[in-house]
Image (tube, helix red, strand yellow):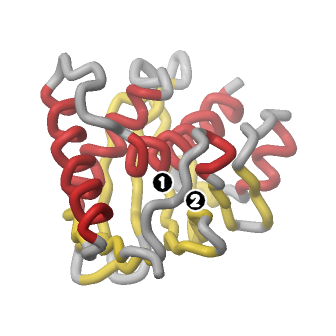
């Protein structure tokens, strides 16, 4: 049960985060400050996509989108805390997950990139507490099935937004630069 909860939390963060980053539209449920902040960040990204200009997101903006993604996928009551840090070569995400009688720390480091109009998160490290975890092994042991549009091969999680929500990826490149995530338009 604990493994299943942890895996669902991880996948929800990756999949939900991708969905919210690239498809949150203004006017959705805006009953909390985080939702309003997420709408503002989504508007910033949408304006950049429309104008075909790069956009830079700070660690706090990425964290805002992650918090909103967690709420959107309906696991907000299981996540007791989140921290997102943009490093030079990876995003570092730490979660405190309510796993029943205990709150468990989960941390993931992933390098995002765009390949063939898909978002690929190359996981360089994942830990539950202080114990390293292998994502494919975790999926195999929990028996959780992945949603259509999400594939895991080795330590790469690939999200095809066209299969998740019918939208294509609105940019062609992701760069991590001095603590910011820079999204650049496609060709």
- Would you identify the image quadrant in which residue 7 lies? top right
Asked whether 73 or 22 is in front, the reply is: 22
How many residues crowd mark 2 within 10 Å: few (<14), some (14–19), many (20+)?
many
Asked whether 176 or 115 is in front, the reply is: 115
Q: Is residue 30 above or below residue 187?
A: above
How far from the left and from the top, in percent, is residue 82? 33, 42
Q: CA distance from mark 1 to mark 2?
A: 6 Å
- Would you identify the image quadrant in which residue 146 lies? top right
Q: Is residue 20 left or right of residue 112?
A: left
Asked whether 111 or 96 is in front, the reply is: 111
Question: Which badge, 1 or 2, comes first in the chain's sequence?
Answer: 1
Residue, disc 1: 107
Q: Determine the secondary structure under disc 1.
A: strand
How far from the left and from the top, in percent, is residue 22? 41, 50
What number is the disc on residue 126?
2
- Would you identify the image quadrant in which residue 143 lies? top right
How far from the left and from the top, in percent, is residue 10? 56, 44
How many residues crowd mark 1 within 10 Å: few (<14), some (14–19), many (20+)?
many
Asked whether 26 or 57 is in front, the reply is: 26
Q: Are marks 1 and 2 in contact (CB under 8 Å)?
A: yes
| Residue found 57% across the figure and 63% down from its top | 119
Tally of marks: 2
The N terminus lies in which quarter of the figure? top right
């Amino acid at each position: 049960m604990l493994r299943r909860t942890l895996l669902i939390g991880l996948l929800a963060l990756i999949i939900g985060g991708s969905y919210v980053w690239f498809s949150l539209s203004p006017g959705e449920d805006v009953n909390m400050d985080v939702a309003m902040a997420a709408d503002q960040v989504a508007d910033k990204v949408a304006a950049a996509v429309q104008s075909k200009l790069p956009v830079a997101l700070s660690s706090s903006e990425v964290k805002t989108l992650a918090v909103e993604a967690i709420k959107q996928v309906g696991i907000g009551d299981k996540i007791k805390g989140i921290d997102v840090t943009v490093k030079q070569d990876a995003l570092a995400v730490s979660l405190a997950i309510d796993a029943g009688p205990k709150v468990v720390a989960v941390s993931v480091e992933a390098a995002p990139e765009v390949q063939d109009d898909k978002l690929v998160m190359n996981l360089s490290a994942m830990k539950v507490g202080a114990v390293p975890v292998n994502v494919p092994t975790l999926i195999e042991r929990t028996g959780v099935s992945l949603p259509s549009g999400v594939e895991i091969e080795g330590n790469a999680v690939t999200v095809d937004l066209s299969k998740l929500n019918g939208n294509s990826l609105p940019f062609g490149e992701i760069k991590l630069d001095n603590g910011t995530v820079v999204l650049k338009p496609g060709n």
